[in-house]
Image (cartoon, coloured by chain):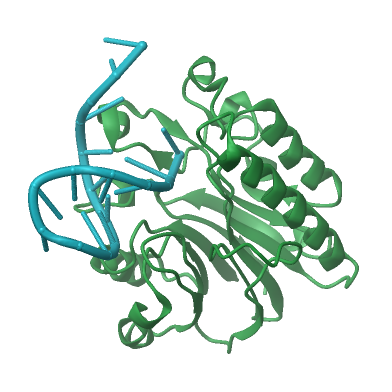
Amino acid sequence: MLKIATFNINGINGRLNVLLRWLQEAGPDIVCLQELKAPSDKFPLKAINDAGYEAVWNGQKSWNGVAVLSKGSPIQEVRRILPGDPADEHSRYIEVITHQLVIACLYLPNGNPYPGPKFDYKLKWFKRLTRHATALLKHEVPVALIGDFNVMPTELDVYKPEKYIGNALFRTEVREAYAALLKKGWTDALRKLYPDKRIYTFWDYLRHAWERDAGLRLDHFLLNEELLPRLKSGGVDKAVRGWEKASDHAPAWITIKS
DNA sequence: ATGGCCCCATTATGGGGA
């Protein structure tokens, strides 16, 4: 069994102890990280290696930044740029091969405030992702798109949907973009496993959101048809959100047959 | 209606997050 996880760490150096403790306790084989908030030369490779993981990463000063960690199999980097916009300098994408899977680790733009250029950038980024994801399907190998999509796909994924009507994470255009991506041949793994369950992966630091369980489901695993039949289980390591110095996201994970 | 929390960069505030 292979355990694949995603964790928006919200500052990899500021929360390195949280990451290392969770790696130790959860023991995932593959980890997609987002919001490193560190330039590439500040990536804590030694600590990650000492924990038993190889890594590839795409950092950026102050913001964004993504990485994939793997143990028990080498990681081969495929690309670190999402095709379609040479002017885009955000580090939001890295694609690798490890454990004989293609893993695309992504951090989709937040898009707030709506309306505005940030929202336009989000929709453009989503279109680029959909185009590239469609190209990935042509290879007919097991592929997963994993990360912080900054989208609550349905009302079931929001503690109070009416509060988020005008929010860039819940705008109709964004939910439609997510649905259109799935329609091309991707399955939302956690939703497939739990069609009716309230699952959250994010709780805001503000307004005691964690204590009130006022959460959002933002972190997703999209599996292609080659990988989906191997899906066994999935969940969220919710307790991590309650740790000292926690990220505002909790790690989510799936297991697949090796 | 507003701001509240927390990161980073820089060093008392500002940008960004969701």
Q: Is residue A226 left or right of residue A16?
A: right
Instruction: State the residue in front, A93 or A46.
Output: A93
In the figure, A36 relative to A249: above or below? below
Q: Quadrant of the N terminus of chain A?
A: bottom right
Q: Position of residue A35 (x, y in %)?
A: 43, 59
Q: Position of residue A210 (x, y in %)?
A: 30, 34
Res A196 → quadrant: top right
Q: Quadrant of the C terminus of chain A?
A: bottom right
Q: Is residue A51 left or right of residue A253?
A: left
Question: Is residue A211 shown to the viewer in this render?
Answer: no
What's the colour of chain B in the image? cyan
In the figure, A122 relative to A102: above or below? above
Instruction: State the residue in front, A75 or A22.
Output: A75
Residue at x 86% of width, y 49% of height: A184
Residue at x 24% of width, y 68% of height: A17
In the figure, A11 relative to A97: above or below? above
Q: Which chain does the green colour mark?
A: A
Residue at x 65% of width, y 57% of height: A232
Residue at x 69% of width, y 58% of height: A231
In the figure, A178 relative to A114: above or below? below
Instruction: State the residue in front, A256 or A116.
Output: A116
Question: Is residue A169 shown to the viewer in this render?
Answer: yes
Q: Position of residue A94 (x, y in %)?
A: 60, 71
